[in-house]
Image (cartoon, rainbow, N blue to C red):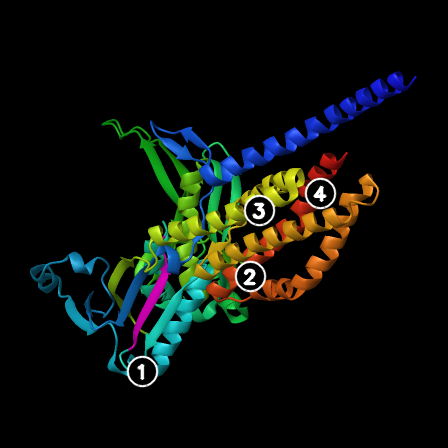
């Protein structure tokens, strides 16, 4: 009987061991796969080269470098050609001096900035408008400084594909005008604009198909009335002109004085004459559209189509970027002074890639030493916990990439702290498990996890509060640290409860 019971116990233990081995192996394999992705990436062939499909880290300017743009108040001049009535001649810059004299035109050369515009108030106003434009364009971090005596503004922004466009948006004055096409009378200007924004619409007609990009300009209360009057005055009109034509047929009198027979008929004709008065929309004196209106617009909103309808995402994005560039210059008012871009260059970071790699190696060595200590001190539980820690770090590094966390030097310091917190948590958890070994097996890990969570998060609660507060600070250094700490602590809390706890529970069964 004892032999049978012993065999049954051995068989039962063997079945239990097989039952827990498969889930443990699955968890370990998932951790290994996640670690390989986090540290080595996923490479696929793209146009005869291997490309990593895992998102790269978003680095702040102190790690990646920055584009430095230096702007100074313009001392340049603008030449205009006017006709006999004093109206500016379109494309006058293309006329030669002989052609100007022949046509009786006059040429004027005026400074872009009057002397009165070189003032501290205008410099400060220009800086504020540029800051608003950077914010509207979604620039994650920037540094803007004003040298008040000279009016020179220096801007540092992250380097990316849109940096050149951003630089051009900063120096655009943004003077908006709706003028009469013939008389050049200004009908509306920047003061009438409330908001400009980019909109999208679907188009599915015989002539166009795909997504259309629109620039919608909303006017103020007074601007709404002005725009209604403009659309009423410059509406397409059709005039009907009615005329008559007379056809006469007769027979000439013959020599014998025969009676003359005359037959006369009248035909009525109608001509449709379309009379169109047009307006011209200008930004900084450059015409962007000449149009008239089909009907009176009372909504106070004007929609301008940018490009044509398209199904190509790259083309749509290009049109949207063009529309956004115009919207930026309209939303925050026009610059009170013209600026020239004197400097536009990329400045490398003082922190080199080798220094970052060296710091990463030092942290990796420290982590490796700690994991070896866990394995030696806690044996099987130490081995499983060490594997789980590697998975937690890997998941955390992937998460901050896809959460679009901008990493500054302070953010890297936050990563080191998060790794340290993970090691401290596992050390405390393993110690609790050892202390609870005298209790029932199925309660050892559960009790240890509960006790560790309560004591550990009670200690780091101030760190959690500070991390959340730093997330809402606009200063990149602090927000980077706060976001890294937030995602790190969140990963620690969820991952170790779901993965490490279950892995250790399976190990004790």
Instruction: Say which residue label 4 marks.
Output: 501
- At numbered mark 2, what does the secondary structure look like: helix, strand or loop? helix
**Comparing marks 3 and 4, which lies closer to the viewer?**
3
Look at the image and give the residue range highlighted in magenta. Answer: 151-159
Q: Is residue 92 above or below residue 186?
A: above
41 displayed left or right of 169: right
Q: Quadrant of residue 221?
A: bottom right
Q: Earlier in the sequence, mark 1 or mark 3?
A: 1
In the rendered image, residue 4, in percent from the top left (x then y), is placed at 88, 16
Give the residue at x 43% y 32%. Answer: 43
Residues 52 and 372: in front is: 372
Q: Earlier in the sequence, mark 2 or mark 1?
A: 1
Q: Are marks 3 and 4 in contact (CB under 8 Å)?
A: no
Instruction: Say which residue label 2 marks.
Output: 482
Give the residue at x 78% y 26%. Answer: 16
**Residue 230 visible at all:** no
In the rendered image, residue 413, in percent from the top left (x then y), is placed at 48, 59
In the rendered image, residue 351, in percent from the top left (x then y), is placed at 35, 58
In the rendered image, residue 69, in percent from the top left (x then y), is placed at 30, 63
Residues 462 and 222: in front is: 462
Instruction: Say which residue label 1 marks.
Output: 119
């Amino acid at each position: 009987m004892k032999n049978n019971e012993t065999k049954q116990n051995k068989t039962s233990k063997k079945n239990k061991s097989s039952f827990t081995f498969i889930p443990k192996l699955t968890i370990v394999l998932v951790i290994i796969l996640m670690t390989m992705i986090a540290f080595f990436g996923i490479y696929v062939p793209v146009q005869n080269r291997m490309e990593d499909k895992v998102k790269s880290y978003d680095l702040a300017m102190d790690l990646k470098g920055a584009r430095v743009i230096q702007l100074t108040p313009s001392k340049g001049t603008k030449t205009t050609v006017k006709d006999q009535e004093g109206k500016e001649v379109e494309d006058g810059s293309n006329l030669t001096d002989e052609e100007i004299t022949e046509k009786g035109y006059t040429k004027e050369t005026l400074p872009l900035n009057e002397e009165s515009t070189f003032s501290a108030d205008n410099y400060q106003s220009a800086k504020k408008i540029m800051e608003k434009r950077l914010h509207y364009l979604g620039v994650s971090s920037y540094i803007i400084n004003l040298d008040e005596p000279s009016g020179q503004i220096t801007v540092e922004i992250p380097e990316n594909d849109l940096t050149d466009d951003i630089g051009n948006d900063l120096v655009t004055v943004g003077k908006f005008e709706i003028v009469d096409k013939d008389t050049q009378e200004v009908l509306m200007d920047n003061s009438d604009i409330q908001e400009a924004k980019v909109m999208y619409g679907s188009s599915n007609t015989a002539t166009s198909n795909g997504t259309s990009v629109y620039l919608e300009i909303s006017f103020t209360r007074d601007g709404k009335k002005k725009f209604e009057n403009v659309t009423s005055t410059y509406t397409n009109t059709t005039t009907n002109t009615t005329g008559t034509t007379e056809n006469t047929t007769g027979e000439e009198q013959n020599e014998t004085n025969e009676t003359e027979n005359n037959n006369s008929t009248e035909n009525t004709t109608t001509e449709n004459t379309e009379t169109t008065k047009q307006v011209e929309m200008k930004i900084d004196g450059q015409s962007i559209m000449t149009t008239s209106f089909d009907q009176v617009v009372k909504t106070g909103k004007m929609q301008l189509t940018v490009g044509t309808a398209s199904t190509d995402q790259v083309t749509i994005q290009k049109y949207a970027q063009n529309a956004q560039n115009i919207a930026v210059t309209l939303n925050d008012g026009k610059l009170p002074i013209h600026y020239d871009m004197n400097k536009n260059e990329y400045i490398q970071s003082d922190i080199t890639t080798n220094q970052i790699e060296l710091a990463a190696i030092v942290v990796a060595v420290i982590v490796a030493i700690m994991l070896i200590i866990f394995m030696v001190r806690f044996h099987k539980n130490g081995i499983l916990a060490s594997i789980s820690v590697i998975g937690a770090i890997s998941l955390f590094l992937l998460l901050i990439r896809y959460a679009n966390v901008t990493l500054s030097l302070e953010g890297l310091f936050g990563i080191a702290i998060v790794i340290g917190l993970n090691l401290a948590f596992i050390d405390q958890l393993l110690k609790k498990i050892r202390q609870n070994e005298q209790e029932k097996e199925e309660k050892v890990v559960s009790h240890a996890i509960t006790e560790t969570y309560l004591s550990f998060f009670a200690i780091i609660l101030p760190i959690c509060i500070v991390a959340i507060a730093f997330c809402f600070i606009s200063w990149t250094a602090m927000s980077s640290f706060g976001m890294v700490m937030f995602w790190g602590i969140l990963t620690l809390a969820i991952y170790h409860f779901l993965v490490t706890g279950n892995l250790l529970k399976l190990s004790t069964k």
